[in-house]
Image (cartoon, grey):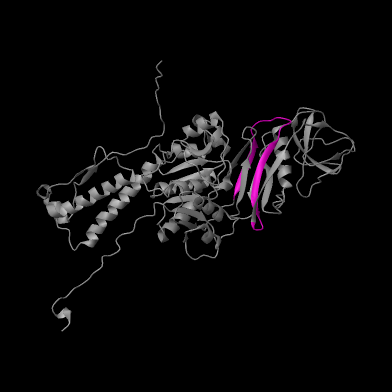
Amino acid sequence: MPLSDIVNVVVSTTGAGVTRPGYGVPGILGYPTGWSELSRTYASISAVGEDFAVNTPEYMAASAVFSQQPRVRRLKILRGANKPTQAFSVGVQLVATQIAYQVRVAIATGVAWKSQTASYNPGNGATGWVPSNTWSQGDLVVADGDKIYSNLGPSGFGFTGIGAASGPSGTLAAIREGGVYWMFVGTGGTGAVSNDSIINGVKTKIDVLDAPPVVGTGIGQLTSAIAGSAGSRTLTLTANQTARFFGLQVLNRSLLNGAQNHADPGVATDLNNVVDEDNDWYGLVTLYNSEALGLAAAAWVETHTKLYPVATMDTAVARVASASATDIAEDIKDNAYARSWAFFHSSNDEFADAAELGRFFPINPGGETWRLKTMRGVEADELTGTEIVNLTAKRAHWYYTLGGVNVVGGEAKTGSGEYVDVTRGIDWYTSELQAKLANLLIGENKVPFTNAGIAQVEAKVVQQNLAGIAAGLIAPDPAPVVTVPDVADISTEDKLDRTLTGVTSEWTLAGAIHEITVTVTANP
């Protein structure tokens, strides 16, 4: 006789329950090819390397995430379809002689990522025109009275040549004189320089970089061009195809200004498509961060349960005071975005935003504060006191050296003024409580509309409050208070609708100490 004839044991398994968002999972919006899916999950940088070359922005951003300690368990690379055409502008902040105007340009070469510095020094400024001299690209001369001319050097023009007797004349942008083309760049006579002459000089140095050559005719990966009107010209650098990434850094913000200024190709559309397929990620990283693209992404994030640090190398973010600013950091603040903030870092190819998510996401929500922590693989910026004041007023984050240690600077806030850790902690608390209560309804055959059933709901809220204390989000003192109604006090209408209302939970944020003041009395 089998035992089942007298004892029947039925084993059932509970369902997996509802899923929670990945509050420790960054999502990098890239533009990979050959994928049918809109996201892929990676648990290591070596896994990322199976799909992306080391000189791609997707790989470099993922490396910034995985380089941090503690380290996230996984990240996702999201596939966008609307590819940006990256572009930068560079302008003159201060006109001076005998000083180096420097711009660092970094670009993919073969399988490497090559960084080079273009340096232009006006020296003593313009020299007088000398007939039959050999002139080089970027040279400044004075001719036709006190007019200053700069030697043009893009492909198709002469880099060197023999000057004619009279020298260039007129006020055009391309004047042929002997074997050389010249551009009128202002007046002032021998020894003088101007905004336009410096911009052209910087351009001539960028054009001869070998990473590969950045040339005005579009041969190579970038196009350099001079834009704007005489006297206030700027330099533009534009990628020669969509989703071609390059790095640009203005090395002295007191001499030059720079900004990434391409259009938004449709980042919100890409993100909507991604979350329809995969919404299990929490922190957004975008790779081509112009003001237009960053603000479009921030507006999208504001209507979703995500966080978004938008890295920016725009020098105005640091140099222009909040009261008169129109940059992305000020815009995020003015819009009171509660889920986004600007992260100023002068090197867009170091992906400080990805590093920040990688540094703080491994910590359980509520157990972290987003400041004064060291990030690996990110070079600290040298910031003036005025720049720090400006960044603080715009609620931006930055990376600098404090007391000999490189740390994340700022007040750890979003554009709205809320602390990042509070936003993340409350998102986590809300999601976990929703999941606990949903799983209660799913896992039980019935939760009765009685005091006993209400007590089951109360227990789940208490359970989540205790988890919040353990995580560091909720202060244990005063203790959280959970209030539930008595079934006798619930309206007949709510009972007929089977809707329980009147459950409340009240607790205090644990907060964090950001600054310390100690008063010391030294007695004789």
- Considering every residue shown, the one lying at the far bottom of the view is 1
In which quadrant will I find the C terminus?
A: top left
Whole-percent x, y for residue 347 in the image: 58, 43
Image quadrant in which you'd find residue 125:
top right
Residue sitting at x 74%, y 47%: 208
* Vertical comparison of 40 with 324: above or below: below
- Considering every residue shown, the one lying at the far front of the view is 524
- Considering every residue shown, the one lying at the far top of the view is 524
* Vertical comparison of 65 with 33: above or below: above
Whole-percent x, y for residue 280 in the image: 40, 57
Whole-percent x, y for residue 227 in the image: 67, 41
Residue sitting at x 30%, y 42%: 474
Horizontal arrangement in the rendering, residue 80 relative to residue 524 (left or right): right
Whole-percent x, y for residue 44 in the image: 50, 58
* Vertical comparison of 431 with 409: above or below: below
Horizontal arrangement in the rendering, residue 432 relative to residue 311 (left or right): left
Q: Magenta stretch containing residue 97, yes or no?
A: yes
In which quadrant will I find the N terminus?
A: bottom left
Q: Magenta stretch containing residue 268, yes or no?
A: no
Question: Along the line of sight, which residue is nearer the eye, 251 or 153?
Answer: 251
**Residue 7 visible in the picture:** yes
- Considering every residue shown, the one lying at the far left of the view is 488
Question: Along the line of sight, which residue is nearer the eye, 230 or 92?
Answer: 92
Image quadrant in which you'd find residue 161:
top right
Horizontal arrangement in the rendering, residue 210 relative to residue 461 (left or right): right
Residue sitting at x 72%, y 46%: 207
- For the record, the magenta segment spans 86-111
